[in-house]
Image (tube, rainbow, N blue to C red):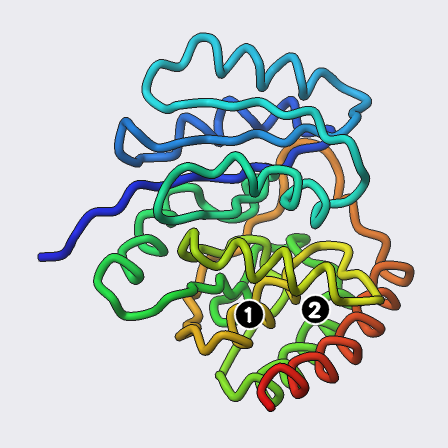
Amino acid sequence: NHKKMSKTLLIPAKNEEGNLDELIERINLEPNTEVIFIIAESQDKTLEKANEIAKVNNLYEFTVLEQQSNGKKNAINEALPYINNDLVAILDSDISVDPEELNNFFDIIEKNLADFVNGTRLVYSMEKGAMRLLNNFGNRIFQKFVSFVIKENITDTLCGTKVFKKHLVDTIYNWDRNIKFKDPFGDFNFIFAASSIGERIVDYPIYYRSRKYGSPQISRFRDGYKLLLNFVNSIVKLNASKY
């Protein structure tokens, strides 16, 4: 028996028109859940689809934002001021993570077992084609380093699905503002920001699916290089914040 908390979903989307209907249909949360779409400039009708869903779906409270900057991390940053509820989930729009799993992420915090729940794709075997080999290798390297630095056993630092308490938002802003080398996705930002204020961080394993519509929007080498610079910068800042 535990206290139910109000929930906000942040859903960044770019060229994901074919995924949004299924994504929303498969979410199974309380009717007062807030859903914030952040739509980047797309080659398809992602924005029109998001607006259509917001108009016809009466179950959740929708906000549709047109992204003014580039990249997933910036999309999330643009959405943070609009959050009204106690708990925040970041959910990628490619349905590579089953939307039904959100209930389990939220449960962990509502039962006071953690302050921050980090999705991990590297525990269960994943669908063929879900993650490219080089991405998998790089992710496992980062995972070992991040776990060592924050002294928590994180098995996947770059899974897009993360759930945390709203009070972390200001820390995320401040963390990002004081980092010279930016994290293109925000995943490191969220984990390091949570660690810097002593949040209890736990992994939750999910099955990672290959996408049905569209194609991955990650540049392995360019984004990997940015992540490496951000990681080194974050270690220095984290050590400084603890003294």
Q: Compared to 41, does 140 lie above or below?
A: below
Mark 1 vs mark 2, CA separation in Å? 8 Å
- Residue at left 48%, top 59%? 168
- Left or right relative to 154: residue 181: right
In which image quadrant can residue 228 be found? bottom right
| Residue 194 percent coordinates (x, y) | 51, 69
Evaluate if marks 1 and 2 touch, with contact meaning CB atoms under 8 Å apart: yes
N-terminal of the pair, mark 1 or mark 2, is: 1
Indicate the amino acid at tag 1. Leu
Q: Can you say which quadrant of the picture contains the C terminus? A: bottom right
- Left or right relative to 87: residue 32: left
Badge 2 element: helix
- Residue at left 34%, top 69%? 114
* Near-viewer residue (222 or 205): 222
Q: Residues within 10 Å of mark 2 (few under 14, many from 20)?
A: some
- Left or right relative to 119: residue 27: left
- Residue at left 46%, top 22%? 62
* Near-viewer residue (208 or 238): 238
Q: Compared to 238, does 129 lie above or below?
A: above
Give the number of the disc on residue 168. Answer: none
* Near-viewer residue (202 or 196): 196
Badge 1 element: loop
Q: Can you say which quadrant of the picture contains the N terminus? A: bottom left
Q: Residues within 10 Å of mark 1 (few under 14, many from 20)?
A: some
Task: List the single residue furthest toward the front.
Answer: 243
Indicate the amino acid at tag 2. Asn
| Residue 198 percent coordinates (x, y) | 45, 78
| Residue 204 percent coordinates (x, y) | 41, 65
Give the number of the disc on residue 122. Answer: 1
* Near-viewer residue (37 or 20): 37
Give the number of the disc on residue 136. Answer: 2
- Residue at left 68%, top 40%? 75
